[in-house]
Image (cartoon, rainbow, N blue to C red):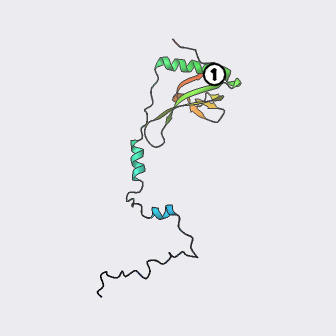
Amino acid sequence: MKKQEKENPYDDIINLPRHVSEVYPQMPIANRAAQFSPFAALTGHSAAVREATRLTEAKRELGEYDKDILDRKLRVLQEWKDGQPEIAVTYFRPDARKEGGEYVTVSGRLKKINLYDGMLILADGCSIAFDDIADLSGEMLDGFWTE
């Protein structure tokens, strides 16, 4: 009788159980998959691209009218600072990595107005330079100087 099929060279081991080491722990499936992930030839390239495409805003220059209103609001706050009024400050925060920044609004209790350094200090420790302030609001300030 003639053999019809060629014998598989692995027939002797194909049905043996898989070896499990008693010394080394089994690698988690997530790590096993990671070893086949693509090689990143340019490490940090995607982070650099994200940083370059991140938008920042230019600092707006306040007009004389807005500066006058802001100055009046600061004077009112100077008179009421001992009562630690609750205020909201919109100010320009410069970006640490590139030109420009963003406008943010923080709320809190007024702790101190440092006229010498030109800083507004909130109770939580947030210090804001007068030159960076775009708007001030609060219960005692709302409704003033609107047309």
Residue 111 lies in quadrant: top right
80 is higher (above) or lower (below) than 1:
above
Q: Nearer the viewer, residue 10 or 66?
A: 10
Residue 44 lies in quadrant: bottom left
Q: Nearer the viewer, residue 139 or 82?
A: 139
In the drawing, does residue 52 fall left or right of residue 142? Answer: left
Q: Where the N terminus falls, by quadrant?
A: bottom left
Q: Nearer the viewer, residue 130 or 17?
A: 17
- Where does label 1 land, which residue? 77
140 is higher (above) or lower (below) than 119:
above
Q: Position of residue 110 (x, y in %)?
A: 65, 28
Q: Position of residue 42 (x, y in %)?
A: 38, 57
Q: Residue at x 54, y 18 (%)?
A: 69
Q: Residue at x 37, y 82 (%)?
A: 9
Question: Label 1 neighbourhood size at 10 Å, few (<14), some (14-19), many (20+)?
Answer: many
> For the image shown, how many numbered marks are present on the structure?
1
117 is higher (above) or lower (below) than 97:
above
Q: Position of residue 113 (x, y in %)?
A: 63, 27
Circle 1 SS class: helix
Q: Residue at x 42, y 41 (%)?
A: 54
The amino acid sitting under disc 1 is Leu
43 is higher (above) or lower (below) than 130:
below
